[in-house]
Amino acid sequence: MQETSRRQIHAKAVSIAVATGAYALSFGAISVSTGLDVWQTQALSLLMFTGASQFAFVGIVGAGGGLVAAVLTAWLLGARNSMYAVGLSPILDLRGVRRLIGAQATIDESTAMALAHPEPRESSRYAFWMTGLWIYVLWNLGTLIGALSAEAIGDPSVLGLDAATAAALLALLWPRLKDRQMWAVALAAAGVAVVLTPVLQPGLPVLAAALVALAAGTLSGRRRTT
């Protein structure tokens, strides 16, 4: 791989990581505002490391939902990363400890960067690792800063953080609504959540919406392969 190409990939990876790290600031603050402490908040970013799942988890917990509903919803939203890993496996060809680290670094952004630089394979691998590792560092740094800041403020309602989870999730979702099919899935899931909110316990409407989105995505994938 040429040095020029390497520098371009690295610069793009850093820019993506900086933008993603900005979301982490809000996550850290929102998480603490829902009742989690700084260490619990940081553990979510270190171990879960997927924005939509983390925002959903703290949103459900903050709304008074059960832990089971929060965990299941977070898992469903993060399940796509497993599909990414299957597709990237032939490209990355990882073994042992590197395979475990690679699994943690497999997110939307690192996958997109790897697939955007298919040739030569070294470029794809470099794009994956640089994007995943930089985002991991800045996501966790942003989480820590946001959590410590919210803890210092004390009252989250001062900054409106008690109502920020939905806005943060929308900000994460919006760039992915690129065609009619994605819009249809998003609107269907949102409709299910709105209808069920008055009749179910907190957290369960979000879980139901995640199941609808997962089912729609699975059916769409099957149609494309037939």
Image: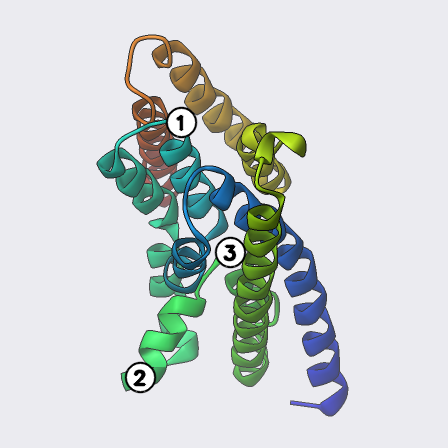
x, y percentage for residue 109?
Answer: 56, 59
Name the residue tied to disc 1: 63
Q: Name which residue type carries label 2.
A: Val
Closer-to-camera residue (63/194): 63
- Give the residue at x 50% y 21%: 187
Which residue is at the front of the view, 208 or 213? 208
Which quadrant, please, contains the N terminus? bottom right
Q: Quadrant of residue 138?
A: bottom right
Mark 3 or mark 1, earlier in chain? 1
Q: Using the rendered view, name the quadrant where residue 10 is placed.
A: bottom right
Alpha carbon distance from label 3 to label 1:
27 Å
* Mark 3 residue element: helix
**Which class describes the residues within 10 Å of circle 1: few (<14), some (14-19), or many (20+)?**
few
Alpha carbon of mark 3 to alpha carbon of mark 2: how far? 21 Å
Mark 3 highlights which residue? 108
Name the secondary structure under disc 1.
Answer: loop
State the quadrant of the C terminus: top left
Task: Nearest to the eye among marks 2 and 1: give it.
Answer: 1
Q: Quick check: 137 left or right of 103? A: right
Residue drawn at 38 percent across, 41 percent down: 57
Q: CA distance from mark 2 to mark 1?
A: 38 Å
- Identify the residue at image location x=28%, y=43%: 71
* Visual colour scheme: rainbow
